[in-house]
Image: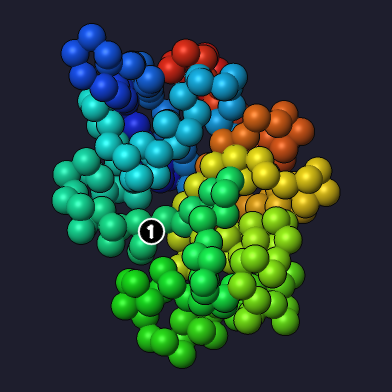
């Protein structure tokens, strides 16, 4: 295996002057290709903040970060957007679907944004929706789907671009236990059968059981990895 993420001395501070909050305090972490890694810790430990740094959705205040052999801290805004579209996939706890777009169109959107052909994007979206068990749901708007189905659309969207890494931030937080287990089973299957690299933030120990490794955060620092 080779390292897909190498983070060194990552700090993240918010605010200015006397109101600075130091959320991440010198994080060192390496994630190998093909790993399924959970980030855990108590509320306020810095879990989501860490994932936002690793997933190139935010910029550390200090530190070094290589993702897929790219020094992402040197990228300008447009380059970072292109990098995310080409290399990374995201699943958020609130699904982050566009309410006025169908399931199919939500999955197509990042493909079209990176310049893929319309028909090719449509075919890929349908195939991804089939793969997550949403055959026949192509035209449904998010409001016509259950929470579990909406999260499956989000997983399909994350997979559509064949990302090197999928980042899942509390993907079960708004789901009942049955739907939550189904989403974890889906991610686990992707990892075991496809070798997909996945980084997931979760509060639930049982959802971290399929992971290869758990990174525990406490007060902005890693206490176990």
Query: How many callouts does the rendering have?
Result: 1
Q: Secondary structure at mark 1?
A: helix
Instruction: Look at the image and tell me whether residue 132 can be seen.
Output: no
Q: Residue furthest bottom?
A: 119
Above or below, 141 relative to 53: below
Q: Residue 61, located in which quarter of the rendered image?
A: top left
Would residue 170 be found to the left or right of residue 2 on screen?
right
Among all residues in the image, which is located at the extreme right?
178
Q: Position of residue 119 (x, y in %)?
A: 46, 90
- Residue 34 position within the rendered picture, expressed as x and y whole percent measured from the top left: 54, 49
Give the class, few, some or many, for how many residues have Cα within 10 Å of label 1's Cα (few <14, many ≥20).
some
User: 103 left or right of 207?
Assistant: left
The image's colouring method is rainbow
The residue depicted at 35 percent of the width and 56 percent of the height is: 84
**Residue at position x 57%, y 36% from top?**
201
User: Which residue lies at the image location 57% right of the left edge and 54% below the top edge?
Assistant: 95
Report the residue at 51% width, 56% height from top: 96
Residue 76 can be seen in this image: yes
Provide the residue designation for mark 1.
87
Picture coordinates of residue 173, whole percent (x, y): 66, 40
Q: Work out whether 82 lies above or below 184.
A: below
Residue 66 is left or right of residue 212, and the answer is left
111 over 197 or under it: above or below: below
Q: Quadrant of residue 138?
A: bottom right
Tell me where residue 164 appears, x and y as whole percent: 45, 56
Task: Return the residue nearer the eye: 27 or 108.
Answer: 108
**Which residue is at the front of the view, 133 or 197?**
133
């Amino acid at each position: 295996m080779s390292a897909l993420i190498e983070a060194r001395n990552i700090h993240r501070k918010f605010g200015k002057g006397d109101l600075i909050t130091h959320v991440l305090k010198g994080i060192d972490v390496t994630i190998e290709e093909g790993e399924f890694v959970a980030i855990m810790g108590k509320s306020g430990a810095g879990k989501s903040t860490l994932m936002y740094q690793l997933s190139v959705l935010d910029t550390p205040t200090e530190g070094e970060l290589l993702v897929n052999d790219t020094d992402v801290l040197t990228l300008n805004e447009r380059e970072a957007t292109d990098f995310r579209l080409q290399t990374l996939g995201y699943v958020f706890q609130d699904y982050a679907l566009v309410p006025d777009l169908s399931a199919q169109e939500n999955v197509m959107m990042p493909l079209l944004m990176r310049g893929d052909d319309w028909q090719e994007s449509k075919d890929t979206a349908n195939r991804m929706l089939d793969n997550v068990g949403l055959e026949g749901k192509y035209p449904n708007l998010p409001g016509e789907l259950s929470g579990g189905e909406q999260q499956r659309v989000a997983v399909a969207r994350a997979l559509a671009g064949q990302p090197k890494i999928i980042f899942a931030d509390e993907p079960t937080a708004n789901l009942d236990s049955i739907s939550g287990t189904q989403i974890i089973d889906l991610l686990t299957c992707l990892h075991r059968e496809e070798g997909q690299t996945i980084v997931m933030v979760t509060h639930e120990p049982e959802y971290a059981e399929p992971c290869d490794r758990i990174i525990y955060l406490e007060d902005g620092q890693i206490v176990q990895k």
